[in-house]
Image (cartoon, grey):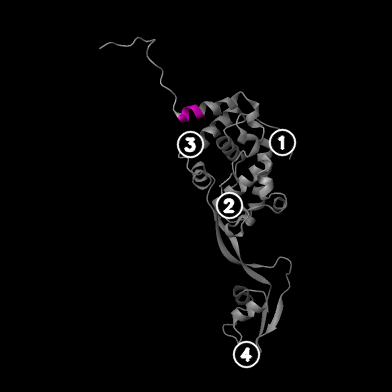
Amino acid sequence: MSLKTSKEVEKPAKNRFGLWQATIDSALSDRRWHAYDCDIQAAVNRFNRHLTGTPNYYFLDWRLVKAMVWTESGGPTNRAWSTRPIQIGNPGDPGLRALFSDKEGGPLILPPDMKDRLTLASATATPQMNIQAGIGYLLMRLAKFGTATVTDATDNKVYEIAAKPGDTFERIARTNRTTVDTLKTLNKNMLTLRPGQTLRFQKASVRKVITRWDPPTPRNIAARYNVGDPDYARKLEYCLSVIRKAQEETACAQ
């Protein structure tokens, strides 16, 4: 049996992840990889400000979103970079429509000043809007929802009504645009209703609310945003290491 000389020994071919890493490493010498920094920072800041009052909210680090853009688009040499860099709204992807549906809680996630401009059409027309939609969808998937009584923000008045024969808390709530919880809170000593009793109430309704959050870690992002890539969390972590190594500080208007 003959032995190969050192010249004949073949170098091991890079695996797919290794080739992908080499592509990401090019960000260290190519300024184009940082083109969306200000757009990402501005969008993340808007979401953080809007959601900071919700229970147990974890502030989102804009660098995580930058890592998602790199992972999803593959970088500035790919078509996705200049069209849909975070890849939400691609044909067959239900995520974008889910974001604008009341069913999954998207309207609670989007900042009020973003709702008018961020639409199905705009999210697939410009990369900046695509990034905003991707952030919104990610946060929607990290949020946990429940229901709660919410008073009408446009009407703080406390009303009074006299109970009629046959009235129940449920009937009074239904006919006066309030809730049973609101009635019982404002009339704590009234355990049973009798005709002629005066009840106090405020306009209120039972609505979907955010009850808590899962932290935006690479593992959670991979589970909630990614579809079908077993290396997604690993890729996000590698992108973050390159982002830190690049030490690119873009001067962004506040």
On-image quarter of the C terminus: top right
Element class at badge 3: helix
Disc 3 and disc 2 in contact, CB within 8 angstroms: no
Q: Disc 4 and disc 2: Cα gap in Å?
A: 46 Å
User: Mark 1 vs mark 2: which is more N-terminal?
Assistant: 2
- Which secondary structure lies at badge 4? loop
Find disc 1 in the rendering and name its residue: 252
* Residue 110 rendering spot, x and y as whole percentages: 65, 52
Instruction: Give the residue at mark 3.
Output: 234
Inspect the image, locate mark 4, and give the three-letter code of the amino acid beneath it: Pro
Q: How far apart are marks 1 and 4 (CA)?
A: 65 Å
Mark 4 closeness class: few <14, some 14–19, many ≥20 residues within 10 Å: few
**Residue wearing tag 4:** 165
Tell me the magenta residue range. 16-20
Earlier in the chain: of badge 1 and badge 4, it is 4
Of the numbered discs in the image, which one, if any, rests on residue 42? none
Question: Which of the labelled discs sits on residue 140, or is there none?
Answer: 2
Q: Position of residue 88 (x, y in %)?
A: 59, 44
Using the rendered view, name the quadrant where residue 6 is placed: top left
- Amino acid type, mark 1: Cys
Instruction: Name the residue rendered at 59%, 66% in the picture.
Output: 148
Q: What residue type is labelled 3?
A: Arg
Spatial separation of the CA atoms under disc 3 and disc 2: 22 Å
First-in-chain label (4 vs 2): 2
Q: In which quarter of the view is residue 159 placed?
A: bottom right
The question of residue 19 being in magenta is answered with: yes
Q: In this view, does 140 lie above or below 254?
A: below
Find out whether the residues at labels 1 and 2 contact each other: C-beta distance under 8 Å.
no
Q: Are marks 1 and 4 in contact (CB under 8 Å)?
A: no
Residue in view at x 37 percent, y 14 percent: 9
- Indicate which disc, 3 or 2, sits on the residue closer to the N terminus: 2
Compare marks 1 and 3 and give the one earlier in the sequence: 3
